[in-house]
Image (cartoon, rainbow, N blue to C red):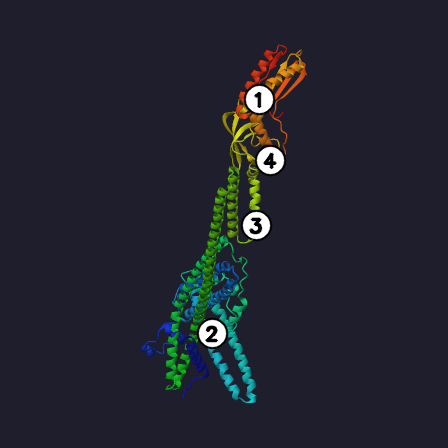
Amino acid sequence: MRLITREAASGLVLLFLTALLIGQSNTTQGGSPQGNSTQTNTNNIGAGQAIQDPTAIIQFLSKTISWHHQLTVEQKLANQPSDLSFLQENRRNADQVVRLAFDYARSQAQLQARQRASQPSQPSSNDSSGQAQRMEQALQNLDQEIEQTQGEIQGFREKLSTASAAKRNALQSQIAETQSEVSLFQARRDAIESMIEFVNSSTSGGGGAGLRAQIEELAGTVPVQLSRAPASNQNQANQSQEESPSPPASSNVVSEPTGIWALAADLIRLSGKLHSLKNELSASESLQQNAQKLRAPLLDYLRNLVRQGDQLASAADTSGPAALTQQKQQLDALTAQFRQTTSGLLPLSKINVLLALQETTIKNWKESIRDQLHDELRQLLLRLGLLAILIAAVFGVGEFWRRATYRYVHDGRRRYQFLLLRRVAIWTAIILILVLSFATQLGSAVTFAGLLTAGIAVALQNVIVSVVGYFFLIGKYGLRVGDRVQIAGVTGEVVEIGLVRIHLMELGGSGESQPTGRVVAFSNSIVFQPTAGLFKQIPGTNFVWHEVKLVLAADTDYHLARERITQAVDSVLATYQENMETQRMLMERNLSSVSGADLKSKVRLYYTASGIEVTVRFPVELGKATEMDDHLMRELLAAADREPKLKLVSAEMPVAKAGV
């Protein structure tokens, strides 16, 4: 029959249940116990406790905090409604991982402080070291007194169940007084333990910051709700849900891209997204490996405690009362060590579970982004193919237009106009197709086009006016290459008509028919300038009016002078009358509003102070202007010589005149 007390039995049950739920579930990871493990010395309870390296603990905690800071990167990545659910899940898991990491670090710091307090201190001449030793000794004494006092309370309670009514009041008073003693001892113990932790954190590590101090320094780098210790283990899960703030709605949520430019930009953004998630997944895997590395020695130590508990349970069946008392003390020590070990092991085990969930969420997120990337890449390729087809169709229509123009339009000027219109239409259509294809939305394209057009209109005002003037110049009564024109007082022959400028070969000399060797360029916008003056020869004609002036003596017979001069002029122009008549008919045909045009010479005589002034105006062909002027002057002078009554005072050479 077993003679184990209720406290030892409860501790043994806790030991077995926890080992079953935690230790044995990880047997495949930590390896099976060796065959000679049953020979463990049960008298050496807790030998070689799993006290971990403080440097490794701080590194793990720092790595966990750095990993948690990656949530800011996730916040920037979440710009789609589908990303918010992944972000919220990762945020919740990451917050719990940080809390558990601080729980693990603090439990290890507390365990190491207790381990140092339980070990005998080395003698030292330093006063602070001696004071620390005295505090550690006082802490051990208080632990013993608390344990003894709690044993007395337990004894009083056992007697209370069987005591008579008269003794019940006295026992209850003793229990209350003993509990007050326990509270007093506990308060003194807490004060001394806090002082020991402060001294250890200030003096450990060769004068550097202790483990507890470093943990609290790292706690200042994260929000308070992530670093503070929970009020109770039962409420830890509830606090995780309540204190973990939900990720704010992403302020940079983008709409579905539609244009080629937006699709290409979104593909680059998604590629960067995948790269960031890949880095975060690698960081999570590295953190999980670090947690497993810290967890392995704790699991081994926990299995050692389980084996020692099994041996004590087996030995209790054949032990006597004295041995059972010793085994009870050993079981109590095992229970305390088991609880200390699980206080550090449980957070690491939970961290492994949460990191596995985190990795699964990130992988699902990556798959979602990868599917979206493939869809948008397919859309981009389809749009590029459609763009190529539309541009090819525009060039095909332009080629058909060109061939039709050469086949059905025989007039050179009309053909040139049709080909020019074809070129403008093709490039306008291509620009519209490109704008509509690359724009994300039609509204944005219209807005962009409006702003761009306004800027271009201001910056290229003269150029635009010149381009518009080009279409006026090539109109029905517009200019052609070879036409004789006069622009801003410059007479010349058109040699080129461009979209922006017109070029003239300047003419001068007698009758303004000789090239001067210069080419004059005018902006096409000159057609909109009222003071510039643009004069063009009537289509189908090549004549101009010349004027010659003669001065006769005052006593000259007026009628005789008019008759002789008119005869001389008519005799000269009769030679060219046929060409003038042909040009008159062409002028009437090309200009329907002109009828009855007269291309005959006109002679006018005026009395002036110097005598009789004679003005003769006559049409001349452009190619024969000099010849006709010379012929007319010889004939007029000959007529004056033949008639003595015509006394010629002076004569001027013929000059070109705009009208008659």
The quadrant of the rendering that contains the C terminus is top right
| Residue carrying label 4 | 528
Mark with earlier residue (4, 1): 4
| Nearest-to-viewer mark from 4 and 1 | 1
In the image, taking residue 464 as reference, residue 20 lies left or right, namely left
Kindly identify the residue that appears in the image at 56 percent across and 47 percent down. 449
Which residue type does callout 1 highlight? Ala
Amino acid on which the number 2 mark rests in the picture: Leu
Outermost residue toward the left in this view: 36
| Marks 3 and 1, how far apart at CA | 68 Å
Neighbor class of circle 3 (other Cα within 10 Å; few <14, some 14-19, many 20+) is: some
Residue 165 lies, in percent from the top left, at 56, 89
**Residue 207: image x %, image y %?**
42, 60
Q: Where is residue 261 in the image (x, y as percent from the top left)?
A: 49, 52
Looking at the rendered structure, which numbered label has been put on residue 446?
Answer: 3
Query: Quick check: marks 3 and 1 in contact, CB under 8 Å?
Result: no
Q: Which of 176 and 449 is in front in this view?
A: 449
Q: Residues within 10 Å of mark 1 (few under 14, many from 20)?
A: few
Say which residue label 1 marks.
574
The residue that label 2 is drawn on is 142
Q: How far apart are marks 4 and 3 (CA)?
A: 30 Å
Q: Nearer the viewer, residue 573 or 308?
A: 573
Q: Which of pointers 2 and 1 lies earlier in the amino acid sequence? A: 2
Q: What residue type is labelled 3?
A: Val
Relative horizontal placement of residue 587, taking residue 372 as reference (left or right): right
Tag 4: residue type?
Answer: Phe
Q: Eyeballing the image, is 637 above or below 312?
A: above
